[in-house]
Amino acid sequence: MPHLTAVITRFAPSPSGPLHVGHLLAALQARKLADVHGGKCLLRVEDIDERAQHPEYLELMYEDLSWLGLSFDGEIIVQTRRFDVYSSVLEKLRDMDLLYPCFCTRTEIRNQVAEMGRAPHATLGYLYPGTCRNLSSDEVAEKMAAGVPHSWRLDMQRVQDLIGCPRWHDMRRGTQRCVPSAYGDVVLARKDFPASYHLCVVVDDASQGVTHVTRGADLFDATHIHRALQGVLGLPVPQYCHHALLRDNAGKRLAKRDGARSIASLRAAGFTPQQVRNSLHIALQRGGIWEV
């Protein structure tokens, strides 16, 4: 592979719980790719979700990263400090007539999908059937005036009409083709929370000049949505690398709720940073099975 001179990667955890060894894998993947090419690895705190707004977990995250000996380059970006940036991008999408208000509850959407006989998408949940897409302006105004809770959805068919089906590159899986309409009209903002993960991550990657995104295979489908957003917003398209996930002996993906495998619990149990890294290396040799 040719030497790349301006590689910028990022590690972007969400402080909704303690970091676990899966986060360590993601951080090491991003750091290694940057180091191999003499580039930079940035740290971004993705706390846009209300579930991630726990100062105690944020402080613990910094402690864990320091204990592991992981360092990052440049300024740390915190998403909840960037609402004005996301709001301006949402306004741009509204001006392009790509957003519409959705007044459906999650229960209503599940019932609508069940009636249609459509199976839920494996990663992104139930694909929205477009119930509110064609509401008249009078209906929208009436609901807005009544204060009906709503979200803002991206009209993916309109997106596809504008940009077609663009391609993106995964370093492990090769060239991919994004078909925006296949992913349903995703939520980009809610009335009580001004931006979604999909919007923020695309805007932040572009703002920070990220050239290579390394992240877990569970986000592979989300990358198609991100490629669609990059297309309509005219943003640079990074290369992607979706690495395998760590799992327990039963094949279950490691998660934050599994406290026994958190970095903090391993620290408390007397592990050294090198022992944790060695255990991670062994897990990868076993196909991603973590047995500590």
Image (spheres, rainbow, N blue to C red):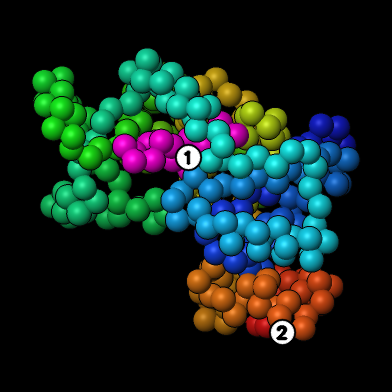
Count the marks.
Answer: 2
Q: Is residue 190 magenta?
A: yes
Residue 210 appears left or right of 49:
right
Residue pointed to by mark 1: 198
- Residue 104 x/y as whole percent: 20, 43
Residue pointed to by mark 2: 269
Residue 138 appears left or right of 170:
left
- Residue 113 x/y as whole percent: 20, 50
Sequence-first tag of 2 and 1: 1
Residue at left offset 39%, top offset 25%: 159
- Residue 131 x/y as whole percent: 18, 37
Q: CA distance from mark 2 to mark 1?
A: 37 Å
Q: Amino acid at mark 2?
A: Ala
| Residue that protrudes farthest toward the front in the picture | 55
Q: Quadrant of residue 135?
A: top left
Q: Quadrant of the N terminus?
A: top right
Determine the secondary structure under disc 1: helix
Q: Is residue 17 magenta?
A: no
Q: Is residue 231 above or below residue 211?
A: above
Residue at left offset 73%, top offset 77%: 267
Residue at left offset 63%, top offset 72%: 262
Residue 159 appears left or right of 218:
left
Could one spot residue 166 in this view of the protein?
Answer: no
Residue at left offset 56%, top offset 40%: 79
Could one spot residue 64 in this view of the protein?
Answer: yes
| CA neighbours of label 2 inside 10 A, class few (<14), some (14 to 19), many (20+) | few
Q: Nearer the viewer, mark 2 or mark 1?
A: 2
Q: Quadrant of the C terminus?
A: bottom right
Query: What is the magenta range?
Result: 186-204
Front-most of residues 208 and 247: 208
- Residue 174 x/y as whole percent: 63, 43
Front-most of residues 227 and 73: 73
